[in-house]
Amino acid sequence: MIVKTISIKTSAAVGNAVRYILAEHKVTPAREPKPTDWRHVPVHLSKSDIDHLMAERSDAILLAEMRKHPDLNIQAFVQQYILGGKNDLNERLSKPVIITNGLRSSSVPGYIKEFQENEKLRQHARKDSIKAYHHIVSFSKLDNQHVTEKMLRDIAQKYISLRGPDCLFLAAVHTDRDHSHLHLIQSGVKVGTGLSARISKQEFLEIKRTLQEFQKDKYRETVRSIVDHGKSRQQKSKNMEAKNVKTHERQEGERTLTSILKMAYATSSSKAEFLDQLRQLGHEPYERNGRIAGIRYNGDDKYRLTRFGLDDKALNDLDLKVDEKKELQSLRSGREQPLDRMRAFDKAREQADKARPLDKYERDEIAEEKAMVENAHMIEREQEQDNEREQSAISPSDFADAEIDNNDIEQEDDDREIEQDDDRDQPDEWSFDHADDAYDIDR
């Protein structure tokens, strides 16, 4: 079965949704008009004429029914339409099927008032809060012969128990289409608590899968209504992932091609030489309307030259003949001419980049660079603050104590030097002994 949900954000829309699902032409089983007795028409027809007309009418009805089922099972069709099998749900419903949960009213105005009164109990009100949810549960038209009133009531009660048994629910069976389906209105807040009845996409996916498992276990004959819930979401995720990979590869190719075009343009003296260099590297130019429009990078991806700032004027400038003065200037400047061309290429490239919007990867790179710069500034500020705190932590008395200690150390050094000088001035024992000997000799 297919399960869908729609958010309702205004009180007026809630009332409209209730009126819609309880519309008489949608919930009241349709009745086939009584067949006209062609024998009592004011035209004289023979019995063979009447039999012929009735056969033609039967054939028309049969063809119309067959057109409704492109992948028709002939055996089932014969059983249902020719041998008297009933396929239409309208023929099996005696009255409208309405299911409620938590509602006490039995009329449309009463249902609307109860939903509105319950919404007033919301604890956290916002301007864009969801007032109600509109759910649709539908089955394949190929399973119409297996869909009964009991089954629809059972599926509705199971869905209510999974989605929100503590919420107001109003459900009705619609018979105005060629397939059976349920419409359910759920309150935006839970009864009694005023808390929101919102759930995540993953939780809603699990509810759909659980409901389908219930259908497969209890109503195995409805095999045509089995679907793969979450398949489209997975496929969308895969497609997005593949698209991101392709975008990243294209951006990498664009960066590489920028360097190639820059070097080729700077070292080429003519347009033909520029294109030949690109062909030798495996990048074939392509034309559009008789002029060079872009480059096939590695023979696959196309890149327009205007994206890199190389328009027709920039290419034609390579073919312009320079006079002798320009040739002398280029000879004297040596490599200045290629450098000038590279600067011109960079400038044209910057202008082309400014003209186009940034993609996701470029925005992420800019954000990372800004974050790195901010972190560096923050670390510098923290270091400056630490130094200031260390300096402020030293008091004037500490400076005075440190100065006194230094004076003591200097006084000790001076005393030590004086003692050493006294030792050097005093004669040792050897000097006194030899002085006595000298005195004796003289005597």
Image (cartoon, helix red, strand yellow):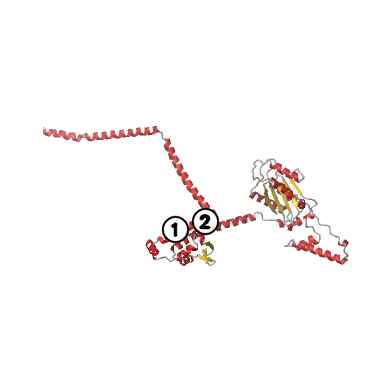
Quadrant (top left, top right, bottom left, bottom right) of the C terminus: top left
Circle 1: residue type? Arg
Circle 2: residue type? Ala
Residue carrying label 2: 355
Quadrant (top left, top right, bottom left, bottom right) of the N terminus: bottom right
Task: Give the x, y percent position of residue 176.
Answer: 75, 54
Which badge, 1 or 2, comes first in the chain's sequence? 1
Q: Name the mark on residue 343.
A: 1
Neighbour tally class for label 1: few under 14, some 14-19, many 20 plus, Cα within 10 Å: some
Q: Residue at x 18, y 35 (%)?
A: 431
Task: Give the x, y percent position of residue 390.
Answer: 43, 38
Question: Distance from label 1 to label 2 (Cα)?
Answer: 19 Å
Quadrant assignment, res 401: top left
* Horizontal side of residue 400 vs 129, given as left or right: left
Neighbour tally class for label 2: few under 14, some 14-19, many 20 plus, Cα within 10 Å: few
Q: Residue at x 44, y 41 (%)?
A: 384
Q: Is residue 412 above or below residue 198?
A: above
Q: Residue at x 44, y 40 (%)?
A: 386
